[in-house]
Image: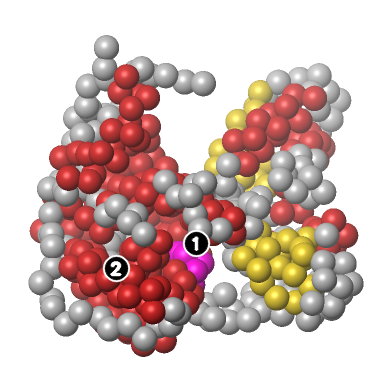
Amino acid sequence: MTAPSIIVSETPLVLYTLRRADDALILGHRLSEWCGHAPMLEEDMALSNMALDLIGQARELYGYAAKVEGRGNDEDKLAYLRDVRQYRNLLLVERPNGDFAHTMVRQLFYAAFADLYWRGMMGSTDATLAAIAAKSEKESAYHLRHASEWVIRLGDGTDESHARVQVAVDDLWAYTGEMFGADDAERGLIDAGVAIDPTMLLPEWLSIVSHVAREATLTLPENDWMQQGGRDGRHSEHLGHLLSELQYMQRSFPGATW
Amino acid sequence: MVVTDLSPAELRQRAWEAAASVADPEIPVLTIDDLGVLREVELVGDRVDVAITPTYSGCPAMNMIALEIELALERAGFREARVRTVLSPAWTTDWMSEEGRRKLRDYGIAPPQPSSGRRALFGVAEVACPQCGSVDTEQLAEFGSTSCKALWRCKSCREPFDYFKCH
């Protein structure tokens, strides 16, 4: 017996909250894959700590999405019983960990965005989202500082580390644009003050990332063609593999507890 | 209710003291009151409603703390307790009591610096060694043994120590 996927009634607010919850869960899961494999003990703890922050954020967001939806779903069902096409996360966060440089560049790109995003969302007219933002903003500040320091150390390090982190920047750049997009469903929430307009965050994000790149002696790609699709459930082949691991237990043993 | 000869205010005080006695499972010298995690204790009929606020979103100690509060209230004679988590206002290290800071230092953990500039991308906070008091210290790792701590080292006495991160 396997557990079937749930159906989620995606009103604009449910969809909006799910998208942010999925970002946090998927990136948190990716970081947790480093547990026991990081290049040194301190980094193993740091990556696990950051994974914990993100999974904590995801829990709050899923709990709220389930409450707003009001159809009897809960945080666990939303995480474990939606199929890949129902996931709404950014393509950036599902990118495989790759080498340590890839993980840190992905972390820098996301954390630089998340830090600005959550700070803006503290002023949301939605009291729950504003409260989640106030917690997440503090955590993102640490994630950003950590990733920035590593990218600088690697970029301004040996020839080998510089080359690897430059490859990571080039590979991941096309996944950054999706962070700043908003569709019609989100426009309504932005007009109502529930959400912030992510396009407004782009100049400051670029300034933060450029500053780190300069310190790290890295070159940011000039191309501005950006990959899209995650927000609508069109994912890379990597997400299905991640979910098969993440969801295995609840799919194979429905309702298992311990 | 086991205790019936108390006024509502005294009962509430008794409930608060019971809940406030619960220690943080990761830092047993601190109570949840010292930490500022305990926000509200209310009596609703025979039931005690307690509000706690997480230090970090993913803090795994919260479930344990909630269970400990229920047990502490039961020991204090309250039949029913309900613990809920509140996110707003978000917990900050500024809520940690002076007593809490002193206990942390005595325990060997450097207390958080009130309202220090965590925004500075590469800002260096001045953290005093909890062993010898020297401020000639350095950070070894920003993420320590729990979500709320970083690992530091004193360059005067050479002792490594935990620093309770500012939030």
Residue visible at 68% across and 41% down in the picture: B41
Residue visible at 30% across and 23% down in the picture: A251
Image height of A200 relative to A54, above or below: below
Q: Position of residue B75 (x, y in %)?
A: 80, 25
Residue visible at 59% across and 55% down in the picture: A41
Q: Which residue is mark 1?
A: A139
Label 2 – label 1 distance at C-alpha:
24 Å
Badge 1 crowding class, 10 Å Cα cut-off, few under 14, some 14 to 19, many 20 or more, is many
Give the quadrant of the N terminus of chain B: top right
Is residue A1 shown to the viewer in this render? Answer: yes
Which secondary structure lies at badge 2?
A: helix
Secondary structure mainly formed by the magenta segment: helix
- Say which of B67 and A150 sits in front: A150
Say left or right for A182 vs B18: left
Q: Position of residue A58 (x, y in %)?
A: 39, 47
Give the quadrant of the C terminus of chain B: bottom right
First in sequence, mark 2 or 1: give its number: 1
Amino acid at pointer 1: Glu
Residues shaded magenta: A140-146
- Residue A168, numbered circle: 2
Host chain of mark 2: A
Badge 2 crowding class, 10 Å Cα cut-off, few under 14, some 14 to 19, many 20 or more, is many
Residue extending farthest to the front is: A159
Which secondary structure lies at badge 1?
A: helix
